[in-house]
Image (spheres, rainbow, N blue to C red):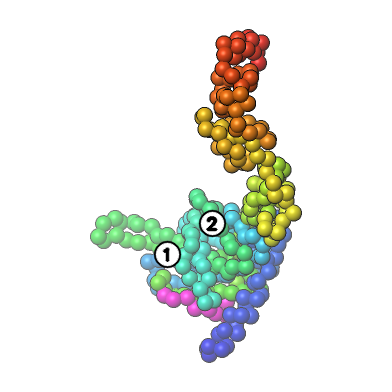
């Protein structure tokens, strides 16, 4: 196949998968709604070299802020194993590139069924508008252990759908991937949690911070949108400032940067009579230290004043 023809083929079939056929709120991509075609052996054990065939299918993440992967569903079956591995690859020149993650697929049976693989731990982030590839492999059984181990390979079948899709195949476990338009696309549904957008968040007490929408709303802020910036926002730019006490040290600071005790808006550090504002012994705030501070403290204590 000529280079020009191959590039045209890749461009055409990538375009056919550029938009997900969404039916669920958590759906990143799905072609499960198409009429099923043939079910074909697409995964054999790595040591089962003879006739080995591994296929990967591509999908494109919708525009937006991306997703955190939660599950991959596919129509599959196996005559001799219940477990397979689902591999996710980055896109590299229109073919699978570096492997990004491996998920365990449980629940395979002799009869075709919709089975699900979920991440074991950690977040797998799917970037917006990015192309990823998914493939399936199965393990093997050791019958006799030791130098003369007998390996019994497993195999698994993955349902194809009749729509034209992007399929990359290879005929040996370590061979390079080859784009082909002769195969139908394996069935696939990718699910994920949308990543909240990041934008300008107006603090209810003044000021602007770049935060995710859910974080902004959690502390009562006003989120201006995922494409906004504090530099051009309409948020009030002033923050309440006052005396900030760190031990006996006092400084005038905004409330949000005070890591000590904020004395109140517009308060000052200058002593009224001669006692540092940050001195807690001046209980009655008279500006002087005397035994009256002790009596006033005891009166408040026995009155139940916190």
Residue at the (52%, 32%) spot, across then down: 249
Q: Which stretch appears magenta?
A: 175-184
Q: Position of residue 71 (x, y in %)?
A: 58, 55
Residue at the (64%, 10%) spot, across then down: 299
- Look at the image and tell me whether residue 77 can be seen: yes
Residue at the (69%, 60%) spot, across then down: 227
Q: Which residue is mark 2?
A: 124
| Secondary element at image label 2 | loop
Residue 176 lies within the magenta run: yes
Q: Residue 60 — which label?
A: none
User: Is 27 on the left-hand or right-hand side of 294?
Assistant: right
In the figure, 111 relative to 221: above or below?
A: below
| For discs 1 and 2, the disc positioned in front in the rendered view | 2
Q: Which residue is mark 1?
A: 45
Q: Position of residue 220 (x, y in %)?
A: 71, 42
Seen from the viewer's position, the closer of residues 156 and 271 is: 271
For mark 2, does the 10 Å Cα neighbourhood hold few (<14), some (14 to 19), or many (20 or more) residues? some
Q: What residue occupies the far front of the structure in this picture? A: 273
- Look at the image and tell me whether residue 135 can be seen: no
Q: Quadrant of the C terminus?
A: top right
Residue 214 lies within the magenta run: no
């Amino acid at each position: 196949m000529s280079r020009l023809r191959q590039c045209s083929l890749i461009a055409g079939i990538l375009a056919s998968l550029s938009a997900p056929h969404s039916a669920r709120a958590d759906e990143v991509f799905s072609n499960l709604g198409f009429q099923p075609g043939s079910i074909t052996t697409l995964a054999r054990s790595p040591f089962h070299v003879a006739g080995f065939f591994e296929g990967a299918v591509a999908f494109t993440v919708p525009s937006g802020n991306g997703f955190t992967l939660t599950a991959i569903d596919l129509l599959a079956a196996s005559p001799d194993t219940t477990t397979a591995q689902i591999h996710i690859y980055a896109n590299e020149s229109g073919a699978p590139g570096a492997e990004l993650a491996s998920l365990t697929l449980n629940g395979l049976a002799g009869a075709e069924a919709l089975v699900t693989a979920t991440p074991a731990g950690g977040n797998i982030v799917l970037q917006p508008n990015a192309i990823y590839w998914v493939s399936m492999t199965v393990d093997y059984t050791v019958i006799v252990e030791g130098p003369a181990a007998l390996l019994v390979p497993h195999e698994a079948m993955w349902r194809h759908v009749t729509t034209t899709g992007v399929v990359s195949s290879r005929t040996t476990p370590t061979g390079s991937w080859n784009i082909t338009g002769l195969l139908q696309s394996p069935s696939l549904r990718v699910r994920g949690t949308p990543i909240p957008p990041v934008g300008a968040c107006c603090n209810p007490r003044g000021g602007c911070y770049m935060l995710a929408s859910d974080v902004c709303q959690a502390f009562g802020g006003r989120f201006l949108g995922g494409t906004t910036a504090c530099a051009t926002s309409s948020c009030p730019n002033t923050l309440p400032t006052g005396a900030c006490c760190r031990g006996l040290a006092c400084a005038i600071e905004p409330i949000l940067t005070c890591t000590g005790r904020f004395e109140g808006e517009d308060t000052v550090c200058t002593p009224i009579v001669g006692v540092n504002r940050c001195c807690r012994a001046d209980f009655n705030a008279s500006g002087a230290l005397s035994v009256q501070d002790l009596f006033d403290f005891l009166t408040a204590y026995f009155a139940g004043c916190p």
